[in-house]
Image (cartoon, helix red, strand yellow):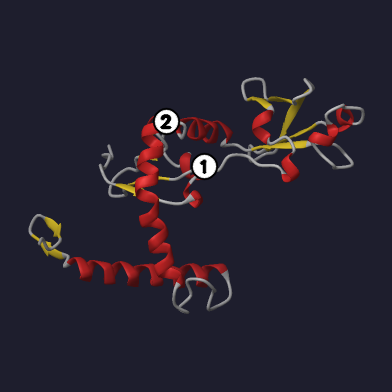
């Protein structure tokens, strides 16, 4: 059985996706910190709250019932989530929006409001709930500046961090991985990292 690790990698909102949280067993998530198996470190990513344009009702003001697979709007109308083969779904309110007294606060769409419910909806809801924990907030605030600073290092020179230097996703992915590897090696050199009989070690003052 793969063992858990104690290290944690903290990332920006790019790590706070349903797919990322669901990449591990449900029991592996504690305070939005994912414990990855074998040699991969844990990761913490912030999940963004739902938003809506012009201050209209956001998704979190709708009652998403995953057990019944329904969504209820702020006006009390309930509709079924229509799922695709991949598990993602959409709740269409359609005609219920026609004479709704709250329509102006909800949508300007001709066909009424729709709510997208992804296959990872429960994991995202759990992560947002965990993010209300004061201990989680304190940990994230203490670590996030380090992450942003490293992203800034990748962007500050014209070597592919801000703009792709080639065409095609596979080539761009390989190029950015090369860039990240170069930065990691440079950082290890600054730290005086060296291989020992018991593993890697860094120089001490």
For the residues marked 2 and 1, what is the alpha-carbon distance in whole angstroms? 14 Å
Quadrant (top left, top right, bottom left, bottom right) of the C terminus: bottom left
Q: Is residue 98 left or right of residue 38?
A: right
**Image coords of residue 73 (percent x, y):** 75, 26
Q: Tell which of 71 and 144 is nearer to you.
A: 144
- Tell me the residue at 22%/70% (across/down): 190
Between disc 2 and disc 1, whose residue precedes? Answer: 1
- Residue farthest to the left? 197
Please say whether residue 43 is visible from this viewpoint. Answer: no
- Tell me the residue at 67%/39% (across/down): 85
Of badges 2 and 1, the one in the foreground is 2
Q: Is residue 17 left or right of residue 72?
A: left
The correct choice, above or below, for 201 with respect to 4 in the image is below
**Image coords of residue 68 (percent x, y):** 66, 20
Please say whether residue 12 is visible from this viewpoint. Answer: yes
Quadrant (top left, top right, bottom left, bottom right) of the N terminus: top left
Q: Tell which of 78 and 22 is nearer to you.
A: 78
Query: Quick one: label 2, few (<14), some, or many (20+) residues within 10 Å?
Result: few
Q: Is residue 112 left or right of residue 46?
A: right
Asked which quadrant contains residue 147, the reply is bottom left
- Tell me the residue at 44%/73% (across/down): 156
Query: Quick one: label 1, few (<14), some, or many (20+) residues within 10 Å?
Result: many
The correct choice, above or below, for 152 with respect to 14 in the image is below
Does the residue at mark 2 contact the one at mark 1 (Cβ under 8 Å)? no
**Image coords of residue 44 (percent x, y):** 40, 44
- Helix, strand or loop at label 1? It is loop
- Helix, strand or loop at label 2? It is loop
- Residue 47: image tag: 1
Where is mark 2, residue-wise?
Answer: 133
């Amino acid at each position: 059985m793969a063992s858990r690790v104690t290290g944690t990698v903290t990332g920006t909102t790019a790590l706070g996706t349903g797919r990322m949280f669901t990449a591990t067993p449900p029991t592996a998530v504690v305070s939005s910190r994912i414990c990855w198996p074998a040699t991969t470190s844990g990761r913490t990513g912030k999940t963004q709250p739902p938003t809506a344009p012009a201050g209209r009702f956001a998704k979190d003001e709708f009652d998403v019932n995953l057990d019944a697979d329904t969504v209820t709007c702020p006006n009390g109308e309930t509709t079924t989530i229509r799922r695709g083969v991949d598990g993602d779904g959409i709740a269409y309110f359609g005609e219920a929006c026609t004479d709704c007294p709250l329509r102006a606060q909800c949508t300007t769409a001709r066909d009424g409001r729709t709510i997208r419910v992804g296959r990872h909806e429960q994991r995202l809801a759990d992560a947002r709930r965990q993010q209300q924990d004061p201990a989680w907030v304190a940990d994230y605030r203490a670590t996030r500046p380090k992450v942003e600073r490293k992203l800034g290092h990748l962007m500050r020179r014209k070597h592919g961090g801000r703009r792709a230097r080639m065409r095609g996703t596979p080539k761009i992915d390989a190029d950015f991985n090369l860039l990240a590897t170069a930065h990691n090696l440079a950082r290890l050199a600054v730290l005086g990292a060296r291989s020992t009989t018991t593993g890697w070690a860094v120089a001490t003052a």
